[in-house]
Image (tube, grey):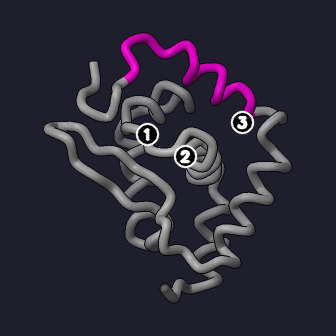
C-alpha cells in the first residue's frame, strides 16, 4: 500500500484525529459512540475526522447495523505503523491520552462489536 507521506503527517497533526488513532491503536476496533464518549466531543465532529482518516486510508471502517466501527488500516506501510506505534508508546501515559482511555473504560453499555447502546 502506498500512502501520501505529507497527508499522513497532516492527519496526525490534528488533536482529534491523533487522539482517535491512539485509542484505536490501543483498543483495536472502536465504534463512533465510544470515540465520542472517550474524547468528549460531538458525534458530528468525530465522524468528520474519521471520514478524513478513512479518505487518507489511515483507518478502515465496518458497518454493523446502524453502527460504524473503525480500526487502524492493517495495510498501512511498515513505516507508518512504526510511527503510530512509537507515538502510542510515547504518549499513552500522558494527558489527554491517559484521560481518553480512562473515560472509555468508564463508558456504560460499551458496544461488543455487534451493537451500541
**Element class at badge 3:** helix
x then y, percent, for residue 11: 59, 65
**Element class at badge 2:** helix
Circle 1/circle 2 CB separation < 8 Å: yes
Q: How crowded is mark 2: few (under 14 residues within 10 Å), some or many (20 or more)?
A: some
The part of the chain drawn in magenta is 96-110
As displayed, is residue 55 above or below residue 63?
below
x then y, percent, for residue 56: 46, 73
In the rendered structure, find residue 30 and report the number of the disc placed on it. 1
As displayed, is residue 3 above or below residue 26?
below
Which residue carries the number 2 mark? 24
Which residue carries the number 3 mark? 97
Q: Distance between the residues labelled 3 and 2?
A: 11 Å
**Element class at badge 1:** strand
Residue at left 43%, top 40%?
30
Which residue, as the protein is rendered here, is positioned at the far left? 65
Q: Which of marks 3 and 1 is in front?
A: 1
Counting residues from the N terminus, which is met first, the one under dot 1 or under dot 2? 2
Residue 111 on the magenta segment: no
Amino acid at each position: 500500500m502506498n500512502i501520501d507521506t505529507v497527508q499522513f503527517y497532516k492527519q496526525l497533526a490534528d488533536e482529534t484525529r491523533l487522539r482517535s488513532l491512539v485509542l484505536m491503536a490501543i483498543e483495536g476496533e472502536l465504534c463512533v459512540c465510544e470515540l465520542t464518549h472517550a474524547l468528549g466531543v460531538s458525534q458530528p465532529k468525530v465522524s468528520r475526522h474519521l471520514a478524513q482518516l478513512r479518505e487518507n486510508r489511515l483507518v478502515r471502517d465496518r458497518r454493523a447495523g446502524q453502527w460504524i466501527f473503525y480500526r487502524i488500516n492493517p495495510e498501512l506501510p511498515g513505516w507508518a505503523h512504526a510511527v503510530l506505534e512509537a507515538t502510542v508508546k510515547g504518549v499513552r501515559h500522558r494527558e489527554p491520552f491517559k484521560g481518553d482511555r480512562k473515560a472509555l473504560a468508564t463508558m456504560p453499555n460499551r458496544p461488543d462489536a455487534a451493537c451500541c447502546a
